[in-house]
Amino acid sequence: MNDTPEYVVGPTGEPMTRDDLPPPSTKRWVIRRKAEVVAAVRGGLITLEEACRRYSLSVEEFLSWQQAIDRNGLPGLRVTRVQEYRSGSGEDDPHPI
């Protein structure tokens, strides 16, 4: 028996199927694509393991996307926020984190 749903509700509120997922070759992770992968895993469309394998993600990276959505909604997935966080020193930043 297969418990995988045919579709889940995507980040825009529209139905999303496996065919709507970003391609495995995705290199540029815009907010929408990250949110689609998170929605697919949460809805059971694909497993966490499959998402990480398909997109060459670490579990930690996927979980950081999920946590960003939980904390700040889709704007939490902005790359600049992650880049600011990862840069670490904050010496050139007038507003260090």
Image: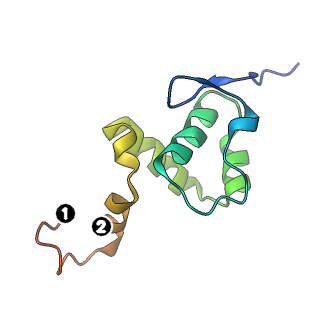
Name the residue at 20% across, 75% down.
Answer: 90
Q: Quadrant of the N terminus?
A: top right
Q: Residues within 10 Å of mark 1 (few under 14, many from 20)?
A: few
Q: Amino acid at mark 2?
A: Glu
Q: Residue at x 67, y 56 (%)?
A: 55
Residue 58 tag number:
none
Q: Are marks 2 and 1 in contact (CB under 8 Å)?
A: yes
The residue positioned 50% from the left and 48% from the top of the image is 63
Horizontal side of 47 relative to 66 (left or right) equals: right
The quarter of the image holding the C terminus is: bottom left
Q: Residue at x 57, y 33 (%)?
A: 39
Report the amino acid beneath label 1: Ile
User: Mark 2: which secondary structure?
Assistant: helix
- The residue labelled by disc 1 is 97
Q: Which residue is mark 2?
A: 84
- Tell me if mark 2 has few (under 14), some (14-19) or many (20+) residues whose alpha carbon lies within 10 angstroms of its own: some
* Whole-percent x, y for residue 22 in the image: 66, 47
Q: Is residue 84 above or below residue 19?
A: below
* Dot 1: element: loop
Q: Where in the figure is residue 15, as x and y percent of width and height?
A: 63, 22
- The residue nearer to you, when weighing 87 against 16, is 16
